[in-house]
Image (cartoon, grey):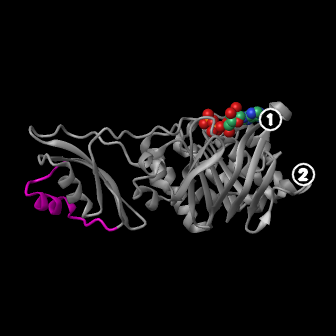
Amino acid sequence: MISLHQLTKVYGQGPDAVTVLDKLDIEVQAGEILAVVGPSGAGKSTLAQCINLLERPTSGQVIVNGEELSGLPESKLRVARRRIGTVFQSASLLSRKTVAENIALPLEYLGVTKAETNSRVNELIERVGLSHRANHYPFELSGGQRQRVGIARALALRPSVLLSDEATSGLDPETTRSVVQLLRELRDDLNLAVVFITHEMDTVLQVADSAARLDHGRIIEQGRLVDLLTNHESALGRALQPNLNPSAPLPGTRSWVVTYDSRDVPADWLQRVSSELGEPAALLAATIQSIDGVSTGNATVGVSNENDAIVKDAFARHGLRASLPNVSRESISISSVQNSAQKEAALWA
Ligand SMILES: Nc1ncnc2c1ncn2[C@@H]1O[C@H](COP(=O)(O)OP(=O)(O)OP(=O)(O)O)[C@@H](O)[C@H]1O
C-alpha cells in the first residue's frame, strides 16, 4: 500500500517559487491500480519523481506499507527505493545488453550473487512471457516486448508498489491491451499497489480500479472507476467514456446521447424504453463495459417523440440519463514526453 499525505513540491524560492504539487492526498491499496491523468503541465512527471523518491517532496509524506520513506536520510533512500519499482515510457533498456542482462541490472547494483541473479531473472523472464527472447538485444524486440522487459526489471527487487510512468504511451492498441493485461495479472499475483500515470483515457478503462485527475498540481477529482462512470456530474467520468461514432438518425428522429446514470440499469433497457415511448428506439451507437460487475457506458439512440421531458423520463426510469448533443469528450490529458532513460539511471545510482 502506498499513501501520499499532503504531498507538496515547490520549485524555486521567494518570488520565483512555483508550487507544482499542492497538498496531494492519494492512497493506493495493495491489489489496486490507480490511474492518474491530467493535462500537460499538471504535475504528473513531478508526481512520479516524488513517488519513486528521485525528487524529494518539499513537504508532506510518501508512506509505503506504513513506513514514511520521504523523510529518510540520503544514505537510507537507496534501500527505500527498492520498495517501489518503476516502469518508464519506452522501457529505456540498455541497447548493448540482452533481455536477461537488462533485467539483471538492479540485482547486480545490489550485489546479489550470480546464481541468485540468474534464478530471479529466469523467473521474471518466464513471468512476462519472454523466455524465447532471453538472449536477444532490445533492437530485436517489439515495443510491447521491450515494455515487458521494463516491467520484469521493475519487479526484480520484489517491490510492493509499481509505478507505471506513461508505460503504454506510444504502443499500438493491441500491444497496449496485452501490456495492461500483464500489469493486471501481476497486480493480482503479487498483490501490488500500482500507480499508473497516463494520458490515454482508453487505457484507464482497461487497467484501472480507480482514477484521479490532477490539474495545476491538485487532485481535482478521484474515485472508483465505476462511481466516476455512473456519475453524470463527474468530468473525469465523462472523459473516460469512449468516443462514439454513431450512425445517422432515421428521418424524423433525433439522436439522444444516453449515459448510464446508476448501477442497476437493466440489460434490456432499450426494449423497455421503446415500449414506454410506444415506438422502437433505434440504437445508433453504444459502448458498454462491465466495471466491478456493474455495467457502465454510453449510447446514441434515435427517438421520434418530440417531447423532451417524456423522452428524458422514459430513460431516467431505467437509470439512464438522456441529453441532446453536443456532449463532447473533454480533453483533459495530453501526452507527456519525458527523459525516462536519465530518470531510470538515477534510480539505481
Ligand atoms: N525542475 C523544475 N523547476 C521548475 N519548474 C518545474 C521543474 N520541473 C517541472 N516544473 C514545472 O512544473 C509544472 C509541472 O510539470 P510536470 O512535468 O510535472 O507536468 P506533467 O503533467 O508531467 O506535464 P507533461 O504531461 O507535459 O509532461 C510545469 O509548469 C513545469 O514547468
Q: Secondary structure at mark 1?
A: loop
Decide: is 136 above or below 292.
above
Q: Quadrant of the C terminus?
A: top right
Extreme residue toward the top, this view: 16
CB contact under 8 Å: marks 1 and 2: no
C-alpha gap between disc 1 and disc 2: 24 Å
Which residue is identified by label 2? 74
- Which residue: 13% across, 61% down? 276
Decide: is 211 above or below 91.
below
Q: Quadrant of ligand 1?
A: top right
Q: Is residue 269 within the magenta segment?
A: yes
Amino acid type for the residue under numbered disc 1: Ala
Instruction: Name the quadrant containing residue 27.
Output: bottom right
Q: Position of residue 271 (x, y in %)?
A: 15, 61
- Return the residue nearer the eye: 134 or 85: 85
Q: Nearer the viewer, mark 1 or mark 2?
A: 1
Say whether residue 184 is left or right of residue 302: right
- Return the residue nearer the eye: 15 or 126: 15
Q: Secondary structure at mark 2?
A: helix
Residue 334: numbered disc: none
Which residue is identified by label 1? 17
Q: Residues within 10 Å of mark 2 (few under 14, many from 20)?
A: few
Q: Position of residue 241 (x, y in %)?
A: 39, 48
| Region in magenta | 264-283
Marks 1 and 2, the one that precedes in the sequence: 1
